[in-house]
Amino acid sequence: MTEGFTKARTMVFPRQVLAGHDVILEVATMCKEFELEGTPLIVTGQTTGALAANHVRDLLKEAKYDVQQVTVGEATQANIVKVEEVAKDVRASFLLGIGGGSKIDLAKLASSNLKIPFISVPTSASHDGIASPRASIKDGGNSLSLNAGEPLGIIADTALIVKAPYRLLASGCADVISNSTAILDWQLADRLRTEFFSSSAANLAKYASESIIENARAIKPNLEESVWIVIRPVIISGISMSVAGSSRPTSGSEHMFSHVLDKTAPGKALHGEQCGVGSIMMMYLHGGDWQRIREALVQIGAPTNAKELGVTREQVIQALVHAHEIRKDRYTVLGDRGLTPEAAERLATITKVI
């Protein structure tokens, strides 16, 4: 007698996604449709507070919500504690993360820890965290990728996001483009280490990446239509992580390269920018069309080399040499031993990164 089938896995997705012109006006309607009651707490920053949070607060007040607000800085452990303490003090029943990636990550983690819902209201599209169940938190100079809850709903207003610096949108594009190498790393781990692989999650992540690459020429500054082109793949990229149950379809060797740069050259470049450059080099190692990735980044206006990232050739080489050390549990094209300094310099030179 054979044992019964016992596999089980949970996948949680946003219940509603609103994307397009002036959809922020629907924030109160979304809350009502979700039957959210009590006190909402807006988690926002200094810049985004003036840009969007005050508008959302007014809309919710008109709908008879007793709105509270907390202003925070970077996504750090201290700021997570701050958000949670304020949420407890005001007896918040749900959160709204309004701002860039760090504010949404803080709301995401706080809502998960407090076991209350949250709604994601991005004011920029600098990476795919606006829709993912993962959060990136800074802790003692390190960047931690932590499990968190999916947003109950997402409101991505293209008229609002287009007002953010174009560099943020270009960075979001680069982050999604880098799915190309993350998927190849995942497939390699499946072949060599029999790691769990989800073709559904990989196909979603690949679709998102290809959508950006194929439309690269149409993505330009100060065009709301460009935001419209980008926002759907960014959201789908985030959702692919929910399907996978991890960040595997969107994070591989190119992200490891980025994480080392976060340590050795902090504050020089954005996360997505670093991942985009990393993806050029990792695609070369996979034997793929690295020139296609590079050309798409050039067309979008994202960095493709060390100078444009604001880092030195030595920092790039160091990041390549030590990238494999970042996540011992995640097998990639870098293998278990990584690259020698000579191989790293050759790789960066061939791909025109240095």
Image (tube, rainbow, N blue to C red):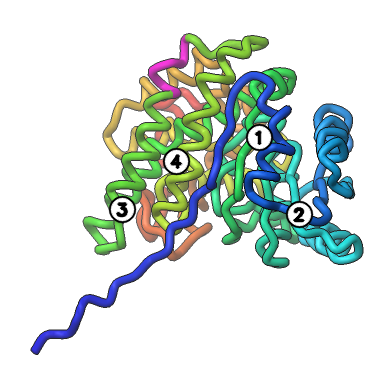
Which is in the foreground here, disc 3 or disc 2? 2
Q: Are marks 1 and 2 in contact (CB under 8 Å)?
A: no
- Residue marked by disc 3: 198
Report the amino acid beneath label 1: Leu
Which is in the foreground here, disc 4 or disc 3? 3
Q: CA distance from mark 1 to mark 4?
A: 22 Å
Question: Is residue 25 in the magenta section?
Answer: no
Q: Position of residue 93 (x, y in %)?
A: 77, 59
Q: Which residues are magenta?
A: 212-217
Q: Quadrant of residue 220?
A: top right
In this orientation, does residue 119 appear?
yes
Q: Nearer the viewer, residue 175 or 29?
A: 29
- Residue marked by disc 2: 37
Report the amino acid beneath label 4: Ala
Q: Residue at position x 90%, y 60% from top?
A: 90
- Residue marked by disc 1: 270
- Few, some or many residues within 10 Å of mark 2 (<14, 14–19, 20+): some
Looking at the image, the residue that sits furthest to the left is 1
- Residue marked by disc 4: 344
Q: Position of residue 240 (x, y in %)?
A: 43, 45
Q: CA distance from mark 1 to mark 3?
A: 29 Å
In this orientation, does residue 264 appear?
no
Which is in the foreground here, disc 1 or disc 4? 1
Q: Position of residue 170 (x, y in %)?
A: 59, 23
Q: Earlier in the sequence, mark 1 or mark 2?
A: 2
Report the amino acid beneath label 2: Glu
Q: Earlier in the sequence, mark 1 or mark 3?
A: 3
Which is in the foreground here, disc 2 or disc 4? 2
- Few, some or many residues within 10 Å of mark 4 (<14, 14–19, 20+): some
From the viewer's perspective, is 230 left or right of 202?
right
Q: Earlier in the sequence, mark 1 or mark 4?
A: 1
